Amino acid sequence: MLIHENMKLADVIQHDHTLVPIINRFGIHLGFGNDNIAEICQKHHLNIDFFLTILNAFHDIHYFPKEQLQRFPAAMLIDYLQKAHRYFLDDKIPEISALMDKMAEEYPLDETTFRLIRNFFTEYAQELKKHIQREEEKIYPYVLYLEKVFLDGSIDEYLRNQIRSYPISEYESEHENMEEKLFDLKNILIKYLPEPRKDELGYQILRELFTLEKEMNEHARIENLILIPKVKAMEKILKNKEI
């Protein structure tokens, strides 16, 4: 089922509650009554096509309109990606970290095993933070400036040097695969946790990790399949311009 503008957002959440954090990234919070998506987007001054495309991409794993997404400005994509970064670092990682701290109470873990699992997650969180920091401090400002110059129709010497010295393809080749590290962590928990006093905590941790993995996968798809090709195309056009 595709989500469309005439649907009530409350009905959409009833059908798929996992969309709540995605909706929150657009500045929309619970308590929107019976308004449909078109009405809510109008109230929040949102691009309805972009909102629906992102919602459907998360709602249906088979829905990913590359060409449609590439038509949106890079600045709009980056604004959304940055809000996702805040969600990962400020909400999701602390939530999972707090659950990890409870493991020693519920599982008969020796100190070495507990430290191993805890340290694995801590290292993952640190790598994710470093990954995000690099994107926000180096990559996204470059993309925003590139798009501004591209829309202006000319290229300055500073940007020309940037394209030559560190094009987006260099970043693409270094782009860490954070999803693999998350998969490894899930495997450790699934295969090697001892029998607990109660199962609920283990299930809760796994649910949160699977949710984070899904959201990270969608995040990476937007970066790798939409943002990076869009930047490559702008770089190619600008690099070939002679002033």
Image: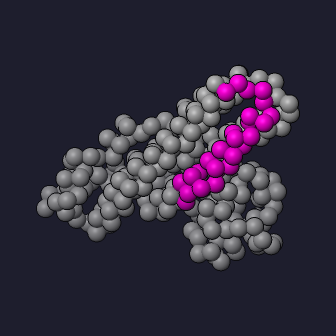
Which residue is pictured at 83% across the width and 37% down the height? 200
Q: Residue 14: x, y in percent?
A: 82, 57
In the rendered image, the quadrant that contains the C terminus is bottom left
Decide if residue 225 is on the left or right side of residue 236.
right
Decide if residue 187 is on the left or right side of residue 146.
right
Which residue is pictured at 80% across the width and 34% down the height? 106
Q: Residue 98: x, y in percent?
A: 69, 46
Q: Is residue 108 magenta?
A: yes
Q: Which residues are magenta?
A: 83-111
Task: Give residue 216's quadrant in the image.
Answer: top right
Task: Give residue 141's quadrant in the image.
Answer: bottom left
Q: Residue 63: x, y in percent?
A: 63, 46
- Judge by depth and name the residue closer to the eye, 40 or 93: 93
Which residue is pictured at 81% across the width and 24% down the height? 195
> How does the figure colour the protein chain or chains?
one colour
Task: Give residue 234's quadrant in the image.
Answer: bottom left
For residue 233, above or below residue 192:
below
Q: From the image, give the main secondary structure of the stretch colored magenta.
A: helix
Q: Is residue 3 magenta?
A: no
Which residue is pictured at 77% across the width and 52% down the height? 16
- Judge by depth and name the residue closer to the eye, 109 or 220: 109
- Judge by depth and name the residue closer to the eye, 6 or 103: 103
**Residue at the extreme front of the image, as rendered:** 111
Q: Residue 93: x, y in percent?
A: 62, 47
For residue 103, above or below residue 51:
above
**Residue at the extreme bottom of the image, as rendered:** 43
- Asked if residue 71 shows in the view, the reply is no
For residue 234, above or below residue 148:
above
**Residue at the extreme left of the image, as rendered:** 243
- Asked if residue 114 shows in the view, the reply is yes
Q: How many marks?
A: 0
